[in-house]
Amino acid sequence: MKKKLIVLTLMFVSTIQAIEQYTNQTFMFPKEIFGSYGMEQASWHNIVYNKHSHGIALQAFAYGQTSIPDTTGSQYFLFDNLNQLIVQNDPTGDTYDVETFTRNILGAWIGIDGTQPFTGSFSLTPKQSQYGVTLAFSQDLSKYFEFAFIRNSSFTVSLPIVHIKNQMVFKGSPEILNAFQGGNAASMGLSEPWQYLILNDQVQQATQASDLKLQFATKYESDDDVQVATTSFLIFPLGESVTNRVLLQPAFNYNGHIVFGAGINFQFPLLRSEDRLQRICFFTGLENKFLFGNNEYRTVEIYDKPYSRFMPLYDRYTQTMVPGVNAFTRNCYVEPFNLVNFIAGLRYKHEESIGEIGYELWGHDTERITINDDNLWVDNRYGIANINNLGELQTPQTASGSTINYVVPDTDETGNVYIQASDLNMLTAAARAALVHRAYISLGLGRKTETVDFFFNAALYMEVVQNNAAFSNWGAWAKIGGTF
């Protein structure tokens, strides 16, 4: 147990370094609503390690949360830590090939009509609501096996069913929204439509059974309000990972990753009344989940060229212009590594009822993204397209010095310059490190009889994200459970 605690603590310490704000990202991995260690343990800890004669315990809990608006969320999906971006077009053609600080994006890059002057701005603010219910069944193994080493062990199966509502709130010019939905692909003369990172400003929602959790638990002490227990578990996804076709697509479970985890849980009394009916207990716990890598489609871009994924590319093989998002979206091997939950707080117990004030910390590190061998970037195939102020392809066909702000055509002397695999920025495609702090208060009403113990528990909570790589939320849960 000591070794397990040391390993979990080291993983926890490495994760809490995530305090940086991020910008120019294409994927976010928000906190899963059903994975809260504090929510799972509330009142459940009182019966799952002290079952009745049949050694069976059941619980069901419903939960819901909605995000709190935060302006830094826009910075995550825009660039240069800006809350809004300015798009301009110059029909005279005097400034399309000159860097200017009056705009962030040259309208010609995204197909906005270059024959008319245009100035507009936009912001992208992510929102999310999650609702669901989890069903859990726990069985003491000693009721079926007479081995000494499993005398205090149990097996638990749990199944969450979750409904997710995501929305990327767009504020800005309709022409810009249409452009980032791929509406200008044909008028720009692109040889194929946009297939990835389409900006859907409407609510995206879906419901599904999220995953199946199989857990093995061992209690070392669970008498007289003293609890020491450890858990090991596997989580199997019941759904696919996101396709990245739409920005901020709902990601269920752990986005298709298989999870191996372990946890440790402590409780001990601080104060007791003389009749021992009233007690104040301190509790703490630490849970670590390791997410195995899987294959997902993610969108990268060129180093030091924010939003280059939205620029048209010249395809040397087909001698046509293609949407950058299509070429930059690759089948990748994604490794999220560890996800940590830490809980601590106080419990006031009166007979079998429990009032609880708790704190929970949830965090994960930045993912590592590697393009798969069967979908590798082909060197010397794609280059940034050399366009004029009307978005038309010019000769030479590439403009390698360009940014989303202006066009820098390659010269006849240098010839076409193409993008190499070493030019790609993989961090743009990664879910970035995040920390979420939760404060909650719960009340559990319990009743003990000769044959059955049962409880009802309800709670309110607020979550505050330490950076902009996840959501701040407020939410609630309600639970019922028992043992017989």
Image (cartoon, helix red, strand yellow):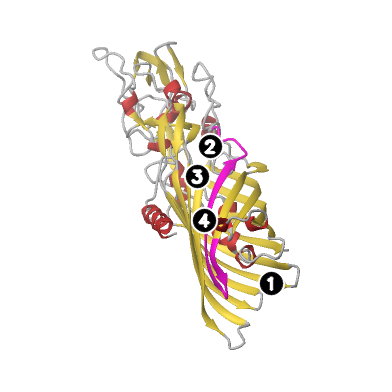
Q: Is residue 466 above or below residue 308?
A: below
Q: Marks 2 and 1: which is nearer the front? A: 1
The structure residue drawn at horizontal position 41% and vertical position 40%, both measured from the top left corner, is 24
Q: Which residue is mark 3?
A: 29
Type of the residue with mark 1? Leu
The tally of labels here is: 4
The structure residue drawn at horizontal position 37% and vertical position 55%, both measured from the top left corner, is 10
Estimate the x, y position of residue 145 in percent, counting from the top left. 64, 53
- Asked whether, in this view, residue 268 is left or right of residue 48, the answer is left
Q: Marks 1 and 4: which is nearer the front? A: 1
| Mark identifier at residue 445 | 1
Q: Is residue 343 above or below residue 386?
A: below
- Asked whether, in this view, residue 278 is left or right of residue 260, the answer is right
Disc 4 is placed on an element classified as loop
Estimate the x, y position of residue 310 in percent, counting from the top left. 44, 29
Quadrant of the rendered image containing residue 407: top left
Disc 1 is placed on an element classified as strand
Alpha carbon separation for disc pair 1 and 4: 29 Å
Is residue 84 in sight in this rendering?
A: no
Type of the residue with mark 2? Leu
Q: Which residue is mark 2?
A: 247
Q: Quadrant of the C terminus?
A: bottom right
Which of these two is toward me, 361 or 51? 51
Sequence-wise, which precedes: disc 3 or disc 4? 3
Which of these two is toward me, 44 or 374? 44
| Structural crowding at the residue carrying mark 2, measured as other residues with C-alpha within 10 Å and reported as few (<14), some (14–19) or many (≥20) | many
- Read off the magenta span: 219-243
| Mark identifier at residue 472 | 4
Estimate the x, y position of residue 141 in percent, counting from the top left. 63, 55
